[in-house]
Amino acid sequence: MNGVVRQSWLVLRHTTRVALRQKTGLVFGALQPLLYLVLFGPLFATVGTWEVLVPGLLAQLGLFSAGLAGFGIVFDARSGVLERLRVTPAHRVALLLGRVLGSSLTLLLQSAALVAVGYALGLRAPLPGVLAGLVLMALLGVGLAALSNAIALTMNPDLFAPVMSTVVVPLTLLSGAFLPMSMAPAWLDALSRATPFRYVVEAVRDLFAGRYLTPAVAAGVAVTAVLTVACTVIGTRVFDRANA
């Protein structure tokens, strides 16, 4: 167990250093939500949209950033890095966990930058609620990144980008990231309730509003925990089997 933890830490440190050296990638990864925040947010600022929009944009960032984390596997497979890693004595699970934690840390940094810009534009959320929301998104990022890496290992590399983009966009819209789904038609609201990300978005919105002990927060925490554990288990099994 100690060996897995240490090896995961080494992989995490390496992936973090690589990510920090690629500052352009960090910026462009958060650019779309930032543009929505700057250009779309002021149109609705008079009705308190910052407390609604910022949590939704965090969810959008999480779905895109962590959901497309498997690109790293695709690049490593094409460059031969993955093949070289397979012959090392490193535990296969550690190779995945290090990558996943690195993706989650990158997501956390991008999310913090998004929230900082939100405060500059008019967000007035309590700090404890913001921190709790960021932790929730980081945990979700762990699970989604693990699942994304697993999918990348089992899918034709040329299909990964179009398939994941096609899946992530409707999931983002159905989560109510931009506007609460309670405003949607009944059929769309019902469809949204079948996706787990709606509950995460609603939980983060309550946290940003300073409401900590609500049914929405409880549901969001429960869904995040189940989703993160399930995706991580699936990811580790697929990664272990693919690299056996």
Image (tube, rainbow, N blue to C red):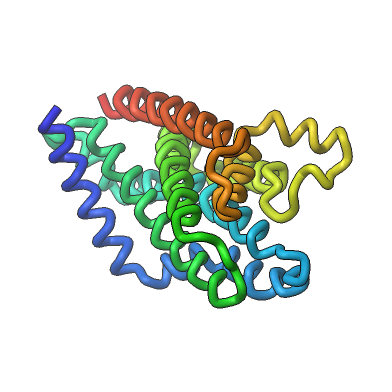
* Residue pictured at 82% horizontal, 37% vertical: 188
Q: Which x, y percent locates residue 116?
A: 48, 70
Q: In the figure, 194 relative to 108: above or below?
A: above
Residue found farthest to the right: 185
Q: Is residue 94 left or right of residue 204?
A: left
Residue found farthest to the bottom: 120
| Image quadrant assignment for residue 37 | bottom right
Q: Is residue 80 left or right of residue 129?
A: left
* Residue pictured at 61% horizontal, 50% vertical: 205
Q: Which x, y percent locates residue 45?
A: 73, 71
Q: Which x, y percent locates residue 101?
A: 32, 45
Residue 70 visible in the displayed image: no
* Residue pictured at 13% horizontal, 40% vertical: 6
* Residue pictured at 42% horizontal, 25% vertical: 234
Residue 173 visible in the displayed image: yes
| Image quadrant assignment for residue 218 | top right
Q: Quadrant of the C terminus?
A: top left
Q: Nearer the viewer, residue 160 or 37?
A: 37
